[in-house]
Image (tube, rainbow, N blue to C red):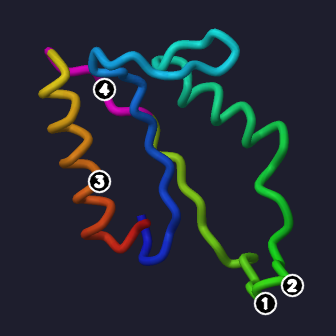
Amino acid sequence: VEHGSVVLLGYPFDDGVKKTTMRGMGCGTMPKTFRSLIRRFKFGVVENPEYDVDMSQLKVLDIGDILAGKGAEDNRAFLTTIVMEVHNRGGV
């Protein structure tokens, strides 16, 4: 992770909360579905004339999914640890 990188991190757990699903898919499949949509539709253009932004140098990293812990509390602890590490390294 480099300073200013955009980091994708999957959290395929619903922690026991009923969530809205996309075409009948549960929360556990959402990171995989999101990644397939990114590959299918790409990220769009790298220059945004409306906001005068050039994103050609933007680094987008996919660091995978949170590994399952023994329960929701462990999962959230893993998520917190990884997000803090990404932040400490300058990722967004």
Callout 4, which amino acid?
Answer: Leu
Crowd tier of the residue under label 1, counting other residues whose Cα lies within 10 Å: few below 14, some 14–19, many 20 or above = few
Looking at the rendering, the stretch of residues picked out in magenta corresponds to 65-70
Residue under label 3, please give it. 83
Which circle marks residue 67 in the picture?
4
Where residue 15 appears, as percent x and y from the top left, is: 28, 21
Give the structural element (helix, strand or loop) at label 4: loop
Q: Residue at x 52, y 63 (%)?
A: 6
Image depth: mark 4 or mark 2 in front: 2
Counting residues from the N terminus, which is met first, the one under dot 1 or under dot 4?
A: 1
Crowd tier of the residue under label 4, counting other residues whose Cα lies within 10 Å: few below 14, some 14–19, many 20 or above = few
Residue under label 1, please give it. 52
Q: Residue at x 53, y 47 (%)?
A: 62
Circles 1 and 4, Cβ within 8 Å, touching? The answer is no
Give the structural element (helix, strand or loop) at label 3: helix
Q: Quadrant of the N terminus?
A: bottom left
Q: Is residue 39 above or below residue 83?
A: above
On screen, residue 4 versus residue 17, left or right, reads right
Where residue 68 appears, as percent x and y from the top left, is: 27, 20
Give the structural element (helix, strand or loop) at label 1: loop
Question: Quarter of the image holding residue 74?
Answer: top left
On screen, residue 81 versus residue 13, left or right, reads left
Callout 1, which amino acid?
Answer: Asp
Residue under label 2, please give it. 49
Callout 2, which amino acid?
Answer: Pro
